[in-house]
Image (tube, helix red, strand yellow):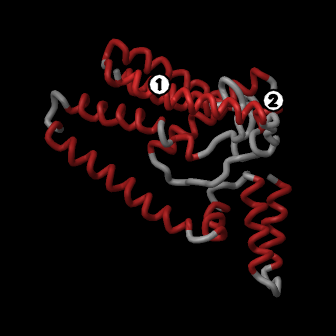
Amino acid sequence: MGCIAVFPPIAVMLFIRSAVIAAAPAAEFPFTDNPITTANFLVGRLNCDQGDGAVSLLTVWPAKLSIDYSYSEIPLFRGTANDWVALIAVSTAFVGVGLLYRWNRPAFFFACFAAVAFLPTANLLFPIGTIMADRLLYLPSVGLIACLVLAFYASAERGPLKSVTPIVLCLIVTGFAARTFIRNSDWKDDFSLVAPLSAPVQRATKVHKVLASLLYTSDSSHSNLDVWTDEAEKTWRS
């Protein structure tokens, strides 16, 4: 009965969506937004490992966040040591998920939930409009965090740490809440949002371009010409 109840609105939504997309022109993704769009199939698929590894690290601790990870913050797969480390790490994670089927079925479910939720935006099946974005982690992070909680309780189930596990998890939640509170201060205006990113994001062309534009327009006397020029040059060097 539940499936019957939700079918009509979903069917209407899909019908309207198909009509809108059918009348819209084909989407075009610039190389600077997602370099995978111009890479060959093998390089594009291998490059997904770098994006997967990066978003996984952001889930563990979002220390350095950005509004943009486009060219060339995440370079294409070139066979460097870092590229192979990322490939091995992601492959190992997939093997670990397979083993969870025998070890812990709830953890296996949540790991698969995270993978399936992330798959449409992973540039694995097809390239999308961005090579990576923090917002793509919102739903997959639910599964990853559930796996983390299960791992904490499983490791402390037969040991003396069982009683302190909730306390440790509360401290982790507090840490993420503090990180969120600090991050919110960056959203006052365009300049405050982009300026802190010039340090953690070194190679993103669009970030340096936006910052250079803001620096130029924010000072009518152009007394900050040296700073503006430096950011403009970073746009070309990146």
Q: Position of residue 227 (x, y in %)?
A: 77, 74
Real-space Cα separation, disc 1 to disc 2, in angstroms: 39 Å
As displayed, is residue 207 above or below residue 164?
below
Q: Is residue 225 left or right of residue 61?
A: right
Residue at x-position 27% and y-position 45%:
169
Residue 212 visible in the current orientation: yes
| Left or right of residue 96, residue 198 in this image | right
Residue visible at 70% across and 31% down? 19
Q: Amino acid at mark 1?
A: Phe
| In the rendered image, the vertical position of residue 81 relative to residue 91, given as above or below | below
Question: Residue 32 placed where, x, y %?
Answer: 80, 45
User: Which residue sits at x=35%, y=24%?
Assistant: 2
Q: Which mark is residue 7?
A: 1
Residue 234 appears in which quarter of the rendering? bottom right
From the image, state whether disc 1 or disc 2 is nearer to you: 1
Circle 2: residue type? Ala
Q: Residue at x 62, y 36 (%)?
A: 51
Find out whether the residues at labels 1 and 2 contact each other: C-beta distance under 8 Å: no
Residue extending furthest toward the top: 102
Closer to us: 55 or 4: 4
173 left or right of 186 in image:
left
The circle drawn on residue 39 is 2
